[in-house]
Image (cartoon, rainbow, N blue to C red):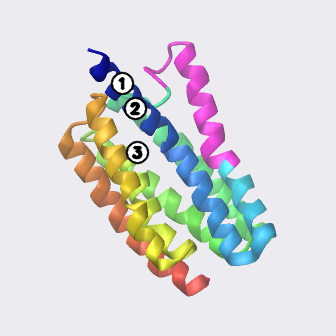
């Protein structure tokens, strides 16, 4: 029984530590740093606070008030307005970045985050897929461009751990985790190709 509880706690910890919001934050900061040093990192941090941390804070408040079933929004129907609102906010921020002269890699990264949200929105119209695993897979691929190429290999441990955790907590089926990984991999490869030209 204790082993089962320990595994459940570990799975929950992995899901929290490697949730989309902190991964988006680290991705945007690394992208900004890679493109323009400290000023770029600050652009990335500011962007992440608006497009990742703010929506997660709102979801936590909504969950406490019982308006959604948890800050990770487990019910498929409840995810649709979350994706739509987050996507609209991300698009506005991306437009502001371009208008204000952000380092090119930052709006590029924001655009790919938006692309991921839109893909998940479309898929969620018919089927629940793991946004956790999708973001983790995209992040792992991007690390190879933003840090060093060999870093992508050890970074693959993150989406694998996240996929196992999401299945073990009962939030997703293995098929939903695999689908999330494939979505994230494809978006990550597109991002890597585009970012490599900008950096």
Q: Which residue is mark 1?
A: 6
Residue 138 location in percent, x, y? Answer: 42, 61
Where's the N terminus, which quadrant? Answer: top left
Question: How many marks can you see?
Answer: 3
Front in this rendered view, residue 123 or 10? 10
Quarter location, residue 119: bottom left
Is 120 a magenta residue?
Answer: no
**Label 3, residues with CA under 10 Å away: few <14, some 14-19, many ≥20:** many
Is 61 a magenta residue?
Answer: yes
| Furthest residue toward bottom | 197
Q: Which mark is residue 132?
A: 3
Which of discs 3 and 2 lies nearer the camera? The answer is 2
Q: CA distance from mark 3 to mark 2?
A: 16 Å
Disc nearer the start of the sequence (3/2): 2
Q: CA distance from mark 2 to mark 1?
A: 6 Å
Q: CA distance from mark 1 to mark 3?
A: 21 Å
Q: Secondary structure at mark 1?
A: helix
Residue 150 location in percent, x, y? Answer: 45, 76
**Magenta range:** 49-70
| Residue 69 visible in the displayed image | yes
Residue at x 23%, y 51% (from the top left corner): 178
Cβ atoms at labels 3 and 2 below 8 Å apart: no
Decide whether the magenta segment is chiefly helix, strand or loop. helix
**Label 2, residues with CA under 10 Å away: few <14, some 14-19, many ≥20:** some
Front in this rendered view, residue 118 or 143? 143
Residue 68 location in percent, x, y? Answer: 47, 21
Where's the C terminus, which quadrant? Answer: bottom right
167 left or right, relative to 149: left
Residue 180 location in percent, x, y? Answer: 31, 51
| Furthest residue toward front | 2
Q: Which residue is mark 2?
A: 10
Residue at x 42%, y 53% (from the top left corner): 136
């Amino acid at each position: 029984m204790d082993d089962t509880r320990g595994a459940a706690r570990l799975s929950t910890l992995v899901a929290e530590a490697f949730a989309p919001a902190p991964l988006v934050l680290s991705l945007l900061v690394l992208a900004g740093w890679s493109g323009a040093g400290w000023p770029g990192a600050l652009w990335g941090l500011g962007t992440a606070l608006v497009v990742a941390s703010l929506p997660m804070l709102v979801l936590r408040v909504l969950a406490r008030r019982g308006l959604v079933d948890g800050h990770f929004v487990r019910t498929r129907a409840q995810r649709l307005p979350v994706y739509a609102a987050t996507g609209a906010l991300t698009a506005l921020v991306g437009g502001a970045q371009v208008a204000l002269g952000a380092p090119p890699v930052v709006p590029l990264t924001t655009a790919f985050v938006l692309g991921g949200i839109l893909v998940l929105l479309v898929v969620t119209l018919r089927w629940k897929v793991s946004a956790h695993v999708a973001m983790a897979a995209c992040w792992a691929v991007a690390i190879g461009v933003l840090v060093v190429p060999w870093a992508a290999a050890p970074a693959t441990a993150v989406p694998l751990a996240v996929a196992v955790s999401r299945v073990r907590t009962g939030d997703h089926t293995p098929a939903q985790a695999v689908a999330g990984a494939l979505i994230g991999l494809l978006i990550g490869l597109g991002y890597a190709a585009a970012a490599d030209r900008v950096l």
